[in-house]
Image: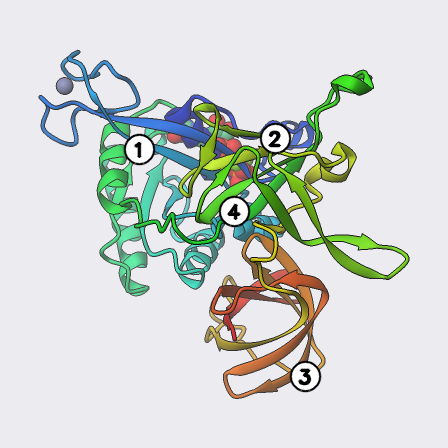
Amino acid sequence: MDHGKTTLIQALTGVWTSVHSQELKRGITIRVGYSDAAFYKCPSCEPPLGYSTSVKCPNCSGESELSRVVSFVDSPGHESLMANMLSGAALMDGALLVVAANKKVPQLQTEEHLLALQTLGISQVVVVQNKVDLLSYKEALASYSDTAKFLKAGGMSKLPVIPVSAQAGLNMDALIHATETAIPTPERDGSKDPVMHVLRSFDVNKPGTPIQKIKGGVIGGSLTQGAFKVGDEIEIKPGVLNEKKKSYEPMRTEIVSLGTGAGMVEEIRPGGLVAIGTRLDPSMTSGDSFIGSVIGRPDTLPENSTKSEMKVSLFDRAVGSGGEDKVASIQTGEQLRLSIGTLPALCKVLKSGKGEIEVELRRPVCLFRGSNVAISRRMPDRWRLIGAGTVG
Ligand SMILES: Nc1nc2c(ncn2[C@@H]2O[C@H](COP(=O)(O)OP(=O)(O)OP(=O)(O)O)[C@@H](O)[C@H]2O)c(=O)[nH]1
Ligand SMILES: [Mg+2]
Ligand SMILES: [Mg+2]
Ligand SMILES: [Zn+2]
């Protein structure tokens, strides 16, 4: 924690993404936050000069062209919030890994986050060496070479490392240039059935709002494929618990509005974070109650299931154990935590074989075959990432 992720996002977007009172009080990010940035490129300046977040080129004062609009998911760094971090990672096309240059490299958190990114298949990463303002030139070089050594040992010597000061807004042009080069926008297939993974959900009404003015529940997340329009009927899975039937029932509602960083729009596609306004009772969506849900068109999503088979590959050792804890094989009957899309889900292992396990999930989940899952095990002190799985 405290490497400066939230500060960096503020430098790039102008938005402080930690806004909850507990976060402000403790100075840490707890919930996943997000905001959008527009990156500009000046046609007359040599890269990286001329990359900025403003139309006016900070280098030559000429007029820049829009390069790309980028959505940032701000992840908590604290080790106890790893599940929140993994939820956010599920929606990322690439990542900025922020490392504080005034601390020994690598920190436990850095190792674990990098491994988590690999586990979830996020290979487009820019390493940000932050807080260089606190170091002498010589110290900064030493920290840079430690970072490079650490990456090389992990077979990631190709990742760019960019020294910055998020607080002073130093070297942002180089960082934006690296981001634009190393994290290209992936190809999207807009013709597939839409799938949205939910990261947040809210009740946007102020207490005491008159009933005729109350807005329906709002659900935030990102499309991974397809498109949604205002007026579309949608289905949300796994849905809500029917107390009488003791089962989860998918919910249907209509899209009444679509909010993005660029304002209200009529249609959304993959690539940014979006808030869907619905006709659901807002009390249902308050306090992130829908995190981990999946939204699609009616009858297009996989069935809810409580059992799953998956191929697994375990790490040699638990991250952050200083190389001491070898990861023991998965035992029948043990409890694990799976990160499935944006959902942290507890499960019990029913069967464990060579490279394969069968699990029973504590709650029904809308499971896509072939999706990547991060696997954590409860170590004495906390949950630790021990491997990766693929839903079979
Ligand atoms: N000197 C210096 N301080 C910085 C810089 N960037 C961030 N900080 C300070 O470092 C502290 C932590 O910054 P945050 O942005 O909250 O760090 P974070 O990575 O979001 O932390 P978590 O959300 O707790 O994981 C704050 O006091 C910042 O003011 C920097 O470039 N230079
Ligand atoms: Mg902090
Ligand atoms: Mg933060
Ligand atoms: Zn310029």
Write the residue at 26% across / 61% down: 152
Q: How far apart are the alpha carbons under marks 3 and 4?
A: 29 Å
Q: How far apart are the alpha carbons under marks 2 and 1?
A: 42 Å
The one nearer the camera, 127 or 137, is: 127
The kind of residue on which mark 1 rests is Val
Disc 1 crowd rating (10 Å Cα; few below 14, some 14-19, many 20+) is many
The disc label shown at residue 88, or none = 4
The answer to whether 198 appears left or right of 304 in the picture is left
* Label 3 C-beta lies within 8 Å of the nearest ligand 1 atom: no
* Label 2 C-beta lies within 8 Å of the nearest ligand 3 atom: no
CB under 8 Å between discs 3 and 4:
no
CB under 8 Å between discs 2 and 1:
no
Q: Quadrant of residue 180?
A: top left
The kind of residue on which mark 4 rests is Gly
Which is more N-terminal, label 4 or label 2?
4
The one nearer the camera, 58 or 291, is: 291
Q: Which residue does the numbered mark 3 point to in the structure image?
A: 332
